[in-house]
Amino acid sequence: MIFIELFLTFFLIGAFTFGGGYAMLSLIQNQVVTVHQWLTPEEFTDIVAISQMSPGPIGINSATYIGYSVPHALGMGPALSFLGSLTATFAVVLPSYLIVLWICILYEKFKTNRYFASVLKVMRPVTIGMIAAAAIILITPYNFIDWWSWALFAVSFAAMLFFKANPIWIIVASGAAGYLIYGI
């Protein structure tokens, strides 16, 4: 049944992702687009964009939208689509909750242990690599359709990197620029 598949898929994604929602995107894309083929790459990119613009963590938002979209695409209707949304969201959050609870218990017990500290230190570059992979995966012809899209990317990237611009203002400005450029 689709709800069991959604639960298991998002539980495993939640269990094996370190570094937050952006690091989670490459795992979600692999499972949802490649393995299960629930979404096309274009649909996944749209869900990531919507998740980015919505309040809350991007990984949880993505799970929520995907959990709704999959049953809906199978013709299950709004009530079961909502159940899919709850299932995927609960599944992706549950491992983090259990792991953080366990780490808190261990941390209090072993916080002065140098081996425990070294494990946490080693996870830092892995997290950065997963975030970079998530960003690189999104660089596709679907997302960069012309030179305007590359220009918006470059300006947004520079504003964040060099000027520490507020992401909300970048999203609002990019939306306005997209409206002016593409006349949607």
Image (tube, helix red, strand yellow):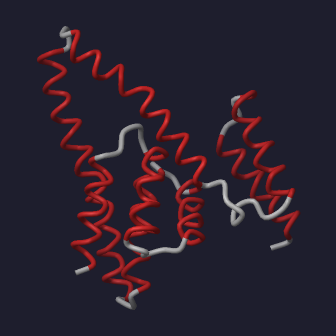
Residue 25 vertical position relative to residue 108 in the rendered view, above or below: below
Q: Is residue 170 left or right of residue 130?
A: right
Of residues 99 and 172, the one nearer the viewer is: 99
x%, y% of residue 57?
Answer: 45, 48
The image quadrant where one finds the N terminus is: bottom left
The image quadrant where one finds the C terminus is: bottom right
Residue 148 vertical position relative to residue 81 in the rendered view, above or below: above
Residue 127 vertical position relative to residue 25 in the rendered view, above or below: above
Outermost residue toward the front in this view? 35
Q: Is residue 163 left or right of residue 181?
A: left
Of residues 61 and 139, the one nearer the viewer is: 139
Q: At 36% across and 28% down in the image, what residue appears? A: 123
Q: At 42% across and 32% down in the image, what residue appears? A: 126
Q: Quadrant of residue 71?
A: bottom left
Q: At 53% across and 74% down in the image, what residue appears? A: 40
Of residues 18 and 97, the one nearer the viewer is: 18
Outermost residue toward the bottom in this view? 75
Q: At 73% across and 39% down in the image, what residue appears? A: 157
x%, y% of residue 169?
Answer: 71, 44
Of residues 140 and 149, the one nearer the viewer is: 140
Q: Is residue 176 left or right of residue 19?
A: right
Residue 128 vertical position relative to residue 148 in the rendered view, above or below: above
x%, y% of residue 14?
Answer: 31, 50
x%, y% of residue 164?
Answer: 69, 29
Circle count: 0
